[in-house]
Amino acid sequence: MTKQPSYGCRAVRYWFADGLPDIVVGLPYILCGGSFELFRLSAYGRWMNAHESLRWLELALICVASGFLMFRERRLLDVLKARITYPRAGYVQPPSLVLRFPNPVAILKILNPRPPRKNENVTDFSAETWWMFCFFVVTSSLLVMWMRPSPGERWLVLLTMPAFAIVLNLVSRRSEHPCGCLSACSLAATGPLLIGAGVPAVWDPFLASLLLGAWLVTRGVLTPSRFLHMNPYPRATEGFRA
Amino acid sequence: MTPQAQEIAQLDRLIHEPARLTIMLILDGVTEADFLYLQREGGFTQGNLSGHLTKLEEAGYVEIEKKFKGKVPLTVCRLTSDGKTAYTRYSERMRALLSGSSKAD
């Protein structure tokens, strides 16, 4: 007999069922990456010497976006869900978000993904995910800051997307919001785009951020269309409240 | 009367009923949930759920609040501290009883 997920676990899954969390997280990354990509395309020749200041500006923007996600994501999602999700399929509030700072236990979890805890009255997957995204973006930014563009070192940056996809797949495999193999492969496949796009190494994090955001939003947009189809508004007779 | 039978007789009958146990189980796993969510998760009809919630509310196990999320009216239910204590006591007692009987086998 297969073990059924607990009601706490189902409530956490329900939080992700409408795809809105993916969209809300993806959009700031698209804005971060997209604005710099547009800037690069429009002022390529004139601003290429301003690398140092641009790198710091990029890091600051990414920090602001990550901070926004950390502290405002839940509230923003609540507003959206109140209009789209709750009237159709009901409202449930998963327990408070637990912020976890990276620690050795988190690294061990990557090597040995644990099953959902017995006490599932806590949703921390979203916090784990945000930390993963911060880790990904900040690491790739620092990598570019410390290195000087050269063909050999560039490969390190190009490996960021596949490495991130593998880590995300492993960490989330048995969580309430898994990143499936197909989904991880599509994220990893965006890595070669960095080569194909012919972007100078210093701009890689911007493009990586854009690709990550686009992947998240695409994943999110596909989910609500299914969700809305499967969960129409309750009929008038079902609108009665206790 | 055996001690085991005594234990069974002391089970909280209000929680022991399957529908109410389902409601308690759902509410124990979340901070709060609304009527529609409980109805879908537990597979209840409206009248059925409404009746059981009323009984749990009267016993002081569940707190029911009508509020708005945006412009959407919601009937939000959550376990009270009494409800949590009663549910914990019930589940511990059941676990002890069942583990005792399986050891005897």
Image (tube, rainbow, N blue to C red):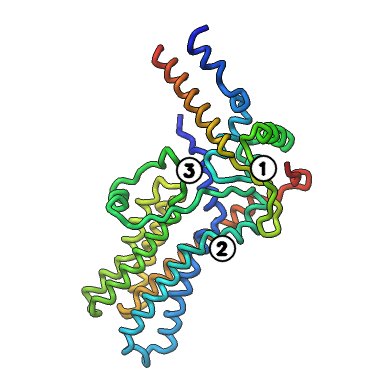
User: SS class of the residue under badge 3?
Assistant: loop
Q: Residues within 10 Å of mark 3 (few under 14, many from 20)?
A: many
Residue pictured at 55% horizontal, 59% vertical: A20
Q: Residue at x 45, y 33 (%)?
A: A3
Residue B68 is left or right of residue A205, and the answer is right
How far separated are the C-alphas under marks 3 and 1? 20 Å
Residue pushed farthest bottom?
A46
Q: Tell me the quarter of the picture where residue B42 sits.
A: top right
Label 1 belongs to which residue? B64
Question: Residue A203's x, y, as percent?
Answer: 35, 78
Q: What is the crowding at mark 1: few (fewer than 14 residues within 10 Å), some, or many (at least 20)?
A: many
* Residue A133 sits above or below residue B4 on the image: below
Furthest toward the top, the residue is B1
Q: Nearer the viewer, residue B25 or B90?
A: B90
Q: Mark 2, mark 1: which one is toward the viewer?
A: 1
Residue A168 higher or lower than B41, as above or below:
below
Please say if A51 is above or below A234: below
Give the letter of the chain under mark 2.
Answer: A
In the rendered image, residues at marks 2 and 3 fall on the same chain? yes
In this figure, which residue is indicated by the disc labeled 2? Answer: A76
